[in-house]
Image (tube, helix red, strand yellow):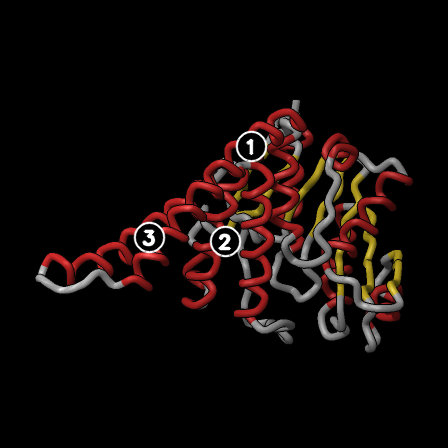
Protein backbone atom coordinates (compact mmCIF):
# COMPACT_ATOMS: atom_id res chain seq x y z
CA UNK A 1 0.00 0.00 0.00
CA UNK A 2 1.13 3.55 -0.71
CA UNK A 3 1.96 4.86 2.76
CA UNK A 4 2.56 8.39 4.01
CA UNK A 5 4.00 8.97 7.46
CA UNK A 6 2.88 12.35 8.83
CA UNK A 7 4.94 13.88 11.62
CA UNK A 8 3.63 17.12 13.14
CA UNK A 9 6.56 18.99 14.66
CA UNK A 10 7.16 22.11 16.72
CA UNK A 11 10.74 22.99 17.69
CA UNK A 12 12.01 19.40 17.46
CA UNK A 13 15.47 19.93 15.95
CA UNK A 14 17.03 17.57 18.51
CA UNK A 15 15.00 14.52 17.48
CA UNK A 16 13.32 15.09 14.11
CA UNK A 17 16.28 13.85 12.05
CA UNK A 18 16.43 10.41 13.68
CA UNK A 19 12.64 10.03 13.67
CA UNK A 20 12.48 10.77 9.93
CA UNK A 21 15.42 8.49 9.15
CA UNK A 22 13.81 5.56 10.98
CA UNK A 23 10.32 6.20 9.61
CA UNK A 24 11.25 6.50 5.92
CA UNK A 25 11.98 2.76 5.81
CA UNK A 26 8.21 2.21 5.81
CA UNK A 27 6.92 4.90 3.45
CA UNK A 28 7.16 8.50 2.34
CA UNK A 29 7.59 10.97 5.19
CA UNK A 30 5.89 14.35 5.50
CA UNK A 31 6.90 16.67 8.32
CA UNK A 32 4.44 19.46 9.06
CA UNK A 33 6.51 22.14 10.78
CA UNK A 34 3.96 24.01 12.86
CA UNK A 35 5.69 27.37 13.15
CA UNK A 36 9.00 26.22 14.65
CA UNK A 37 11.65 28.86 15.29
CA UNK A 38 14.56 26.40 15.33
CA UNK A 39 16.08 24.18 12.59
CA UNK A 40 13.28 21.58 12.52
CA UNK A 41 12.41 22.13 8.83
CA UNK A 42 16.02 22.17 7.66
CA UNK A 43 16.99 18.99 9.50
CA UNK A 44 13.81 17.18 8.39
CA UNK A 45 14.57 17.94 4.73
CA UNK A 46 18.17 16.80 5.11
CA UNK A 47 16.92 13.53 6.61
CA UNK A 48 14.74 12.91 3.53
CA UNK A 49 11.29 14.23 4.44
CA UNK A 50 8.96 16.44 2.48
CA UNK A 51 8.30 19.51 4.64
CA UNK A 52 5.25 21.74 4.77
CA UNK A 53 5.74 24.70 7.05
CA UNK A 54 3.15 26.79 8.89
CA UNK A 55 4.50 30.30 9.34
CA UNK A 56 2.84 30.51 12.77
CA UNK A 57 2.00 27.85 15.32
CA UNK A 58 -1.56 26.66 14.63
CA UNK A 59 -1.75 23.60 16.89
CA UNK A 60 -1.42 19.87 16.39
CA UNK A 61 -4.94 19.50 15.03
CA UNK A 62 -4.27 21.92 12.18
CA UNK A 63 -0.87 20.33 11.52
CA UNK A 64 -2.52 16.93 11.12
CA UNK A 65 -5.23 18.35 8.85
CA UNK A 66 -2.52 19.81 6.63
CA UNK A 67 -0.89 16.38 6.46
CA UNK A 68 -4.18 14.61 5.73
CA UNK A 69 -5.04 17.06 2.93
CA UNK A 70 -1.62 16.41 1.38
CA UNK A 71 -2.16 12.64 1.64
CA UNK A 72 -5.55 12.81 -0.08
CA UNK A 73 -4.21 15.07 -2.83
CA UNK A 74 -1.41 12.56 -3.53
CA UNK A 75 -3.78 9.55 -3.30
CA UNK A 76 -2.03 7.68 -0.48
CA UNK A 77 -3.74 4.49 0.68
CA UNK A 78 -2.88 4.88 4.35
CA UNK A 79 -1.42 7.52 6.65
CA UNK A 80 0.60 6.87 9.80
CA UNK A 81 0.95 9.63 12.38
CA UNK A 82 3.61 9.70 15.08
CA UNK A 83 5.16 12.26 17.37
CA UNK A 84 8.35 14.08 16.45
CA UNK A 85 9.91 13.98 19.91
CA UNK A 86 11.12 10.37 19.75
CA UNK A 87 8.55 8.89 22.16
CA UNK A 88 7.33 6.46 19.52
CA UNK A 89 9.40 3.75 17.87
CA UNK A 90 9.08 4.01 14.04
CA UNK A 91 10.09 0.35 13.74
CA UNK A 92 6.62 -0.48 15.10
CA UNK A 93 4.88 1.16 12.12
CA UNK A 94 4.21 -2.25 10.48
CA UNK A 95 2.19 -3.26 13.56
CA UNK A 96 -0.22 -0.41 12.90
CA UNK A 97 -0.35 -0.96 9.15
CA UNK A 98 -1.18 -4.68 9.31
CA UNK A 99 -4.86 -4.40 10.39
CA UNK A 100 -5.53 -1.85 7.62
CA UNK A 101 -3.73 -3.93 4.99
CA UNK A 102 -5.85 -6.93 6.01
CA UNK A 103 -9.06 -4.88 5.97
CA UNK A 104 -9.70 -5.37 9.68
CA UNK A 105 -9.68 -1.69 10.63
CA UNK A 106 -9.96 1.86 9.29
CA UNK A 107 -8.31 3.51 12.30
CA UNK A 108 -5.56 1.75 14.25
CA UNK A 109 -4.37 3.22 17.54
CA UNK A 110 -1.05 2.34 19.12
CA UNK A 111 -1.91 1.60 22.74
CA UNK A 112 0.36 1.94 25.77
CA UNK A 113 -2.02 -0.26 27.78
CA UNK A 114 -1.73 -3.56 25.93
CA UNK A 115 1.85 -4.55 26.70
CA UNK A 116 2.58 -2.92 30.04
CA UNK A 117 4.08 0.29 28.65
CA UNK A 118 1.73 2.28 30.88
CA UNK A 119 4.03 1.42 33.80
CA UNK A 120 6.58 3.80 32.30
CA UNK A 121 4.09 6.66 32.29
CA UNK A 122 4.61 9.12 35.17
CA UNK A 123 1.89 8.74 37.82
CA UNK A 124 0.37 12.20 37.31
CA UNK A 125 0.07 11.57 33.57
CA UNK A 126 -1.45 8.16 34.21
CA UNK A 127 -4.17 9.76 36.30
CA UNK A 128 -4.83 12.42 33.68
CA UNK A 129 -4.96 9.85 30.88
CA UNK A 130 -7.42 7.75 32.90
CA UNK A 131 -9.79 10.74 33.13
CA UNK A 132 -9.43 11.58 29.43
CA UNK A 133 -9.84 7.94 28.36
CA UNK A 134 -13.01 7.59 30.44
CA UNK A 135 -14.37 10.83 29.00
CA UNK A 136 -13.63 9.66 25.46
CA UNK A 137 -15.36 6.36 26.19
CA UNK A 138 -18.49 8.24 27.26
CA UNK A 139 -18.34 10.45 24.15
CA UNK A 140 -17.54 7.73 21.61
CA UNK A 141 -18.68 4.52 23.29
CA UNK A 142 -15.31 2.83 22.84
CA UNK A 143 -12.51 2.31 25.36
CA UNK A 144 -9.08 2.97 23.81
CA UNK A 145 -5.82 4.79 24.51
CA UNK A 146 -7.50 7.98 23.38
CA UNK A 147 -4.48 10.30 23.62
CA UNK A 148 -1.97 8.18 21.72
CA UNK A 149 -0.62 10.05 18.70
CA UNK A 150 0.80 6.90 17.07
CA UNK A 151 -1.94 5.89 14.62
CA UNK A 152 -2.67 4.51 11.17
CA UNK A 153 -5.64 5.81 9.15
CA UNK A 154 -6.99 4.36 5.93
CA UNK A 155 -7.81 6.52 2.91
CA UNK A 156 -11.49 5.71 3.47
CA UNK A 157 -11.27 7.14 6.99
CA UNK A 158 -9.40 10.23 5.83
CA UNK A 159 -12.15 11.00 3.33
CA UNK A 160 -14.85 10.72 5.98
CA UNK A 161 -13.23 12.38 8.99
CA UNK A 162 -14.02 16.08 9.25
CA UNK A 163 -11.73 17.15 12.09
CA UNK A 164 -12.09 20.65 13.50
CA UNK A 165 -10.03 20.52 16.70
CA UNK A 166 -7.01 22.83 16.40
CA UNK A 167 -5.03 21.40 19.31
CA UNK A 168 -4.23 18.10 21.04
CA UNK A 169 -7.93 17.28 21.45
CA UNK A 170 -7.78 16.20 17.78
CA UNK A 171 -6.91 12.72 19.08
CA UNK A 172 -10.30 12.38 20.81
CA UNK A 173 -12.09 14.19 18.01
CA UNK A 174 -10.79 11.61 15.54
CA UNK A 175 -12.13 8.70 17.59
CA UNK A 176 -15.56 10.27 18.11
CA UNK A 177 -15.92 11.15 14.42
CA UNK A 178 -14.72 7.68 13.36
CA UNK A 179 -17.37 6.03 15.56
CA UNK A 180 -20.00 8.37 14.18
CA UNK A 181 -19.09 7.36 10.64
CA UNK A 182 -19.23 3.66 11.47
CA UNK A 183 -15.50 3.13 10.85
CA UNK A 184 -13.69 0.16 12.37
CA UNK A 185 -11.34 1.07 15.22
CA UNK A 186 -8.65 -1.26 16.54
CA UNK A 187 -5.74 -1.08 18.99
CA UNK A 188 -2.29 -2.67 18.77
CA UNK A 189 0.41 -2.69 21.48
CA UNK A 190 3.27 -0.20 21.20
CA UNK A 191 6.18 0.87 23.37
CA UNK A 192 6.73 4.45 24.51
CA UNK A 193 9.78 6.36 25.76
CA UNK A 194 9.53 9.27 28.19
CA UNK A 195 13.24 10.05 28.48
CA UNK A 196 13.15 12.41 25.51
CA UNK A 197 14.21 16.07 25.15
CA UNK A 198 11.50 18.69 25.58
CA UNK A 199 8.92 16.17 26.74
CA UNK A 200 6.75 18.94 28.23
CA UNK A 201 5.93 21.46 25.51
CA UNK A 202 2.79 22.59 27.33
CA UNK A 203 1.81 22.80 30.97
CA UNK A 204 0.36 19.31 31.71
CA UNK A 205 -2.51 20.70 33.78
CA UNK A 206 -3.67 23.31 31.27
CA UNK A 207 -3.17 20.82 28.44
CA UNK A 208 -5.26 18.17 30.19
CA UNK A 209 -8.03 20.60 31.13
CA UNK A 210 -8.17 21.89 27.56
CA UNK A 211 -8.56 18.38 26.15
CA UNK A 212 -11.13 17.52 28.85
CA UNK A 213 -13.16 20.61 27.96
CA UNK A 214 -13.22 19.49 24.33
CA UNK A 215 -14.29 15.98 25.38
CA UNK A 216 -17.15 17.43 27.42
CA UNK A 217 -18.27 19.44 24.38
CA UNK A 218 -18.15 16.28 22.25
CA UNK A 219 -20.26 14.46 24.85
CA UNK A 220 -22.73 17.34 24.66
CA UNK A 221 -22.86 17.00 20.88
CA UNK A 222 -22.98 13.22 20.65
CA UNK A 223 -24.92 12.42 23.84
CA UNK A 224 -26.63 15.60 25.03
CA UNK A 225 -29.18 13.82 27.21
CA UNK A 226 -26.36 12.22 29.21
CA UNK A 227 -24.49 15.49 29.71
CA UNK A 228 -27.52 17.60 30.52
CA UNK A 229 -29.00 14.79 32.59
CA UNK A 230 -25.89 14.75 34.79
CA UNK A 231 -25.97 18.55 35.12
CA UNK A 232 -29.68 18.35 35.95
CA UNK A 233 -29.01 15.74 38.63
CA UNK A 234 -26.32 17.94 40.16
CA UNK A 235 -28.80 20.85 40.26
CA UNK A 236 -31.40 18.68 42.02
CA UNK A 237 -28.79 17.50 44.56
CA UNK A 238 -27.83 21.10 45.32
CA UNK A 239 -31.53 21.97 45.61
CA UNK A 240 -32.00 19.10 48.07
CA UNK A 241 -29.09 20.26 50.22
CA UNK A 242 -30.38 23.84 50.29
CA UNK A 243 -33.91 22.64 51.12
CA UNK A 244 -32.55 20.63 54.03
CA UNK A 245 -30.60 23.65 55.32
CA UNK A 246 -33.74 25.80 54.98
CA UNK A 247 -36.15 23.43 56.76
CA UNK A 248 -33.94 21.78 59.36
CA UNK A 249 -34.17 24.75 61.80
CA UNK A 250 -37.97 24.76 61.39
CA UNK A 251 -38.24 21.14 62.57
CA UNK A 252 -36.23 22.11 65.64
CA UNK A 253 -38.78 24.74 66.50
CA UNK A 254 -37.15 27.66 64.70
CA UNK A 255 -37.86 29.52 61.49
CA UNK A 256 -37.42 28.56 57.87
CA UNK A 257 -34.27 30.06 56.35
CA UNK A 258 -35.71 32.05 53.45
CA UNK A 259 -32.45 32.51 51.51
CA UNK A 260 -31.74 28.76 51.38
CA UNK A 261 -35.38 28.03 50.48
CA UNK A 262 -35.27 30.48 47.56
CA UNK A 263 -31.95 28.97 46.44
CA UNK A 264 -33.49 25.47 46.53
CA UNK A 265 -36.36 26.65 44.34
CA UNK A 266 -33.98 28.25 41.85
CA UNK A 267 -31.89 25.09 41.52
CA UNK A 268 -35.04 22.98 41.06
CA UNK A 269 -36.04 25.24 38.15
CA UNK A 270 -32.52 25.05 36.69
CA UNK A 271 -32.58 21.25 37.01
CA UNK A 272 -35.89 20.99 35.19
CA UNK A 273 -34.70 23.33 32.41
CA UNK A 274 -31.47 21.37 31.95
CA UNK A 275 -33.33 18.08 31.70
CA UNK A 276 -35.82 19.47 29.17
CA UNK A 277 -32.93 20.99 27.17
CA UNK A 278 -31.20 17.61 27.17
CA UNK A 279 -34.32 15.90 25.83
CA UNK A 280 -34.74 18.45 23.05
CA UNK A 281 -31.06 18.40 22.06
CA UNK A 282 -31.07 14.60 22.09
CA UNK A 283 -33.90 14.56 19.57
CA UNK A 284 -32.14 17.16 17.41
CA UNK A 285 -28.85 15.23 17.55
CA UNK A 286 -30.58 12.07 16.36
CA UNK A 287 -32.25 13.98 13.52
CA UNK A 288 -28.88 15.44 12.42
CA UNK A 289 -27.19 12.02 12.48
CA UNK A 290 -30.02 10.44 10.52
Q: Nearer the viewer, mark 3 or mark 2?
A: 3
Q: Residues within 10 Å of mark 3 (few under 14, many from 20)?
A: many
Question: Mark 3 or mark 2, which has the lower sequence index?
Answer: 2
Q: Nearer the viewer, mark 2 or mark 1?
A: 1
Percent coordinates x, y for residue 37 in the rendering: 83, 77
Depth check: 108 or 130 in front? Answer: 130
Q: Residue 59, relative to residue 231: is it above or below?
A: below
For the question of whether residue 102 can be seen, the reply is: no
> Which residue is the site of mark 3?
239
Measuring from the top left, give residue 104's x and y in whole percent: 61, 27
Question: Who's the residue at 70% across and 52% down the image?
Answer: 165
Assess disc 2: are there few (<14), some (14-19) or many (≥20) residues with their C-alpha within 10 Å of its C-alpha: many
162 and 263: which is toward the camera:
263
Q: Is residue 149 above or below residue 4?
A: below
Reading the image, the residue beneath label 2 is 132
Q: Which residue is mark 1?
A: 280
Task: Provide residue 34's location: percent of width, then percent of height.
Answer: 80, 64
**Are there few (<14), some (14-19), or many (20+) residues within 10 Å of tag 1?**
few
Q: Residue furthest left?
A: 252
Which residue is situated farthest in the top direction here? 290
Image quarter in which the C terminus is found: top right
Q: CA distance from mark 2 to mark 1?
A: 27 Å
Work out whether residue 205 or residue 266 is closer to the camera in this orientation and state it.
266
Amino acid sequence: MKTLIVIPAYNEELTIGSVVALAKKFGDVLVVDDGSFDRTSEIAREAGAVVIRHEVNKGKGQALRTGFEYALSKEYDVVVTLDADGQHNPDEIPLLLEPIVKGKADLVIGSRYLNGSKKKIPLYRRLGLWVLNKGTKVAAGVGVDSQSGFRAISEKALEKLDLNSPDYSVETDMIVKARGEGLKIMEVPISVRYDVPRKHKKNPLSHGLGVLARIVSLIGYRRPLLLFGVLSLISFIVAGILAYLALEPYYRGGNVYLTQAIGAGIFVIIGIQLFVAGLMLNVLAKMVRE
